[in-house]
Image: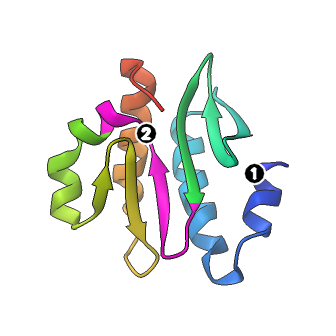
Amino acid sequence: MTIDEYIQAQDEKIRNQLQCVREAIRNELPNAMEKISWSMPTYWQGHNIIHFAAQKKHIGLYPGPEAVQHFADELDKHGFRYSKGAIQIPYSDALPLTLISTIAVWCRDTGKHA
């Protein structure tokens, strides 16, 4: 399965949001390979950098535990729920594309990743 196929397989109401997350990450990680890993869209460059996935009520962003800890204050400002390695972005919220991009770059640059 490709990321295009993954997005097309999701509910029509959320495809655009998933595509926006994809573009935000892809724009910042142009040298990373896109693939499906752990049944999720994944960005890989010698290792998995970051994943995202469609969940029932939110988009899950999976940058790894160090990234979640590093960005906890910013996530709190947005009111997002998060746990070790996972961030929940409700479908009803505006997508924080700048924050998503920043997290992706941090994961790549620090080597602390999903």
Q: Is residue 95 visible?
A: no
Disc 1 element: helix
Going by the numbered disc 2, the residue's amino acid type is: Pro
- The answer to whether residue 44 is above or below residue 21 is above
Q: Tag 2 or tag 1, which sits nearer the N-term?
A: 1
Q: In the rendering, which numbered label is found on residue 97?
A: none
Q: Which residue is mark 1?
A: 3
* Mark 1 and mark 2: Cα distance apart in space: 17 Å
Residue 3 painted magenta: no
> Which stretch appears magenta?
54-67
* Residue 93 appears left or right of 53: left
**Residue at 63% across, 40% down:** 42
* Residue 6 picture location, percent across and down: 76, 59
Residue 57 painted magenta: yes
* Residue 91 picture location, percent across and down: 46, 76
- The answer to whether residue 84 is above or below residue 5 is above
* Residue 112 appears left or right of 73: right
* Residue 40 picture location, percent across and down: 65, 49
- The answer to whether residue 96 is above or below residue 57 is above
* Residue 38 picture location, percent across and down: 66, 41
**Residue at 21% across, 67% down:** 79
**Residue at 75% across, 51% down:** 3
Q: Which residue is mark 2?
A: 63
* Residue 38 appears left or right of 60: right
